[in-house]
Amino acid sequence: MRVLIIGANGKIGRQLVSEMQSDSNFSPVAMVRQTNQYQTLLSQGVETALGNLESSVDSLSKLMIKNKIEAVVFTAGSGGHTGADKTVLIDLDGAIKSMKAAKESKIERFIIISSFASNLWHDNHVPESVKSLGYYSAAKFYADEWLKKSGLDYTIIRPGRLTDNQATGHIQIGQLTEASEVSRADVVSVIIEVLNNEQTIKKDFDVVNGSTPIALALREMI
Ligand SMILES: NC(=O)c1ccc[n+]([C@@H]2O[C@H](COP(=O)([O-])OP(=O)(O)OC[C@H]3O[C@@H](n4cnc5c(N)ncnc54)[C@H](OP(=O)(O)O)[C@@H]3O)[C@@H](O)[C@H]2O)c1
């Protein structure tokens, strides 16, 4: 499966590219926005595409078609060092532009990395962990809402606070409200498992550290 990884220079993105490179089921195509990142990845033998989420839907669609993409993983984000303007332009608008580009390119499968419990942004009892993140939670909420209505074969993954700890292979997933953390390495394994399991299509769930093996946790959720 040829998978476009949007946000491939990020912490999750890099690990995902590396995992997919050693998995014969996948041919990752890393989308990055800077030429030095492009050159580095190419020199590591990674198929790479230069693209920017602040460009047009049309240019993103051309990139997807040119690279014969079959599924998209959106794991980009403006990062905590930027302000609300970039959160809107990347986490919300950039995500929706990627969904539109996927539709225009006749790609069906779309996985997004959202954030923990952001689906509860409009809930009467929105958890404090979601409320305190303000516009970031709102951006994630609306991007995910758009994806649900897009007609794409989506899966929405909402991780807790990300750590750089080693993979445990064990998680807790579901519609969760108790904020906790999860390693990026385990999130990468969840993404791969999700792509391998069509029953995760049109599903959304939170993921944090836990005691259930990843594949089993997904099967139990379905
Ligand atoms: N941090 C947490 O605790 C947490 C918790 C839940 C969910 N999340 C979400 O998890 C996802 C991935 O997290 P992470 O730690 O891997 O993030 P990260 O390391 O900050 O990576 C984000 C990537 O997005 C890329 N990006 C930003 N603007 C772009 C643009 N205009 N065009 C193309 N790419 C662009 C960045 O590119 P550059 O490398 O060029 O800057 C970066 O590589 C994000 O969506 C984040 O919101 C985070």
Image: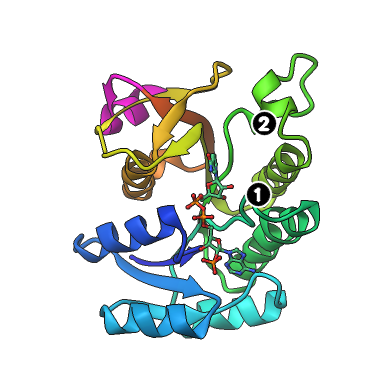
Outermost front residue = 81
- The mark that comes first in sequence, 2 or 1, is 2
Region of the chain picked out in magenta, as a range: 210-222
Image coords of residue 39 (percent x, y): 39, 85
Number of marks drawn? 2
Q: Is residue 222 visible?
A: no
User: Any mark on residue 66, and which?
Assistant: none
Residue sitting nearer the eye, 99 or 28: 28
Which marked residue is nearer to the observer: mark 2 or mark 1?
2
> Does the magenta-highlighted stretch encompass residue 214?
yes
Q: In this view, does 199 lie to the left or right of 92?
A: left
Image coords of residue 215 (percent x, y): 27, 33
Q: In this view, does 61 lie to the left or right of 64?
A: right
| Placement of 9 over or under 150, stated as above or below | below
Mark 2: amino acid? Asn
Mark 1: amino acid? Leu
User: Any mark on residue 147, and which?
Assistant: 1
Task: Locate ligand 1 by image quadrant.
Answer: bottom right
Residue at numbered disc 2: 119
The overriding secondary structure of the stretch rendered in magenta is: helix
Label 2 and label 1: CA atoms lie apart by: 12 Å
Which colour scheme appears in the figure?
rainbow
x 60%, y 55%: residue: 77
| Placement of 175 over or under 25, stated as above or below | above
